[in-house]
Image (cartoon, grey):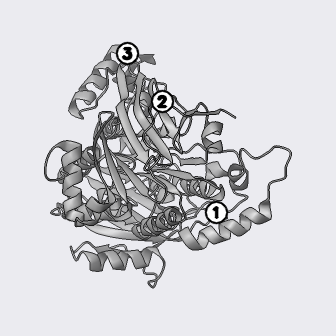
Amino acid sequence: MDIVTETPTNLPPEKGAGIIGIHGVTKRFPGVIAINDASLTFHPGEVHVLLGENGAGKSTLVGILAGLQEPDEGYLSLNGQKTRLSSPSASLDAGISTVFQHSVLVPTLTVLENLTLGAPWYERPPRDRIAARMAELKNEFALSLPLDAITGELSLGQQQQIEIARALLRDSKVLILDEATSMLTPQGAEELGARMQKLVKSGLAVIFITHKLAEAYRFGNRISVLKQGALAGQMGPEQIGSMSEDQAIDEIVRMMFGREAATTSNTHRESTARDEVVLQVEGLTTPGDADVMGLQDISLTLRAGEILGVAGIDGNGQKQLAEAVAGQLPVTSGRVMLDGEDISKATVAHRRRRGLRYLTDDRLEEGSVAAFPVSENTVLKDIGQPPFWVNGLERPQRIAQHAREMIANFSVRTPSETTPIGRLSGGNIQKVLLGRELHGEARVVVFNKPTYGLDLQNIDTSRQRISEIAERGLGVVLISTDLDELMALSDRILVMEGGRIRGIVDNDGSGEALRLRIGRMMAGEEEHKQASA
């Protein structure tokens, strides 16, 4: 056991001390102060929301509570006693379960094996008990997870569901949820919010990290805002209860950015769609099995300057649609037409040269090589191609110059082009990937959850760039689990359910009526209607 507790003389009084206390904690990394003299208290019976931009220190704070890192200065307390969490096992022994933003599952193991990681090696996994509990979680959260499926073959959303389920299977006193709603539908997020309230009513403390300000207001009992590693402000239960959602959001934005109104807007953009069809998909079908969703007879059209949104509960074929269009997934039937050319049999490289670009939702594992410098990541999809390679020889200076230009054009925050891309924040990695895909003559850009895990300002920047891409006359397919995002940007919204198109609706700005209609289709409640117009 790595938990060390003692009763110090300088702890706050026992009353109000909370289950976990963070007292003057500072954490430094080379050239960066990630946490700067921060003090916070997390109480049982509360959902405590942590907000802040990328780089504000949220992830470092989570790492400290999870036993992955230790403070350089300051200390933690557990139930009023000074505590040292020197390892992940110590954190678990202290009753702290963490669902991280980025998956920590073992991709080669089954769902059942991942759910039982950390159990005594000599005991047989209690399959029947876990199956019974998973049946309960399916009803509570719509967590439908095949226990014998290989984890790495599941979607990111399903993998995150495994981590939530694993945390709920433990008898935890504290549950940390890092961006847990990013993969959920609005209905699923509301269900998670209701579940969090049930958990805290039983005495659990929930630490909920999110970038969605409306979620912070709806789900949180207490809200803390971090800025540049320090506590910028806090709102307690009484203050939150006395405010409307708009008032609370204005106050949160003021704490985060020192201004009165958020830059991110859910106002529907003015359409820039033209008559010219740039992408046409006809009867697209892909193989599937019990673990991987197959596509069934997908047909759609995309016009120049149009943003076609794709909505659906994560794991209903959206990723397969993106990969089939991009050429990464084999198809059993159907056609993909780009500017009138049949590219159904074309390679990924050929589709890219013809102007079809794809931004994956998995920035760290699929979209980039974390250990490679930013410069190398800007040309990953152009290896061997001029002007970066000539006669088979790499031109490092040309690649470096190209990277510096991209860094400037896309406002990438990095020490230099030689910095490993894995050291950048999620928002800056996303900027590099977007710059890479827009290099050259792009015609159609497929985005898969482009703002997942980004902070408020980077969400706003990403949405603005997507709008600008459409204004330039490119066609955009926007896959997102954020319905507000789809309603703000899309000309039409395609809804997927069970690997099929449930319907395609015009984004007429009807607000809640449109949201309700889309939500019903996402849940499979409306009659199937294949649409391609």
Q: Marks 3 and 2: CB-CB under 8 Å?
A: no
Element under label 1? loop
19 or 420, nearer to the observer: 19
Question: What residue is shown at x 72% (from left), y 55% (from top)?
Answer: 112
Q: CA distance from mark 3 to mark 2?
A: 19 Å
Give me the disc on residue 385: none
Above or below, comparing residue 211 to residue 276 in the picture = above
Residue, disc 2: 370
Crowd tier of the residue under label 1, counting other residues whose Cα lies within 10 Å: few below 14, some 14–19, many 20 or above: many
Residue, disc 1: 145
Mark 2 residue type: Ala
Q: CA distance from mark 3 to mark 1?
A: 46 Å
Mark 3 residue type: Pro
106 or 3, nearer to the observer: 3
Element under label 2? loop
Which of the image's four quarters has the N terminus?
top right
Residue 20 at x, y = what percent?
49, 44
Mark 1 residue type: Leu
Whether residue 307 is visible here, answered yes or no, is no
Determine whether, in the image, residue 110 is placed left or right of residue 245: right
- Please identify the quarter of the rendering in which residue 93 is found: top right
Of pointers 3 and 2, the one earlier in the residue sequence: 2
Q: Nearer the viewer, mark 3 or mark 1?
A: 1
Residue, disc 3: 396
Element under label 3? helix
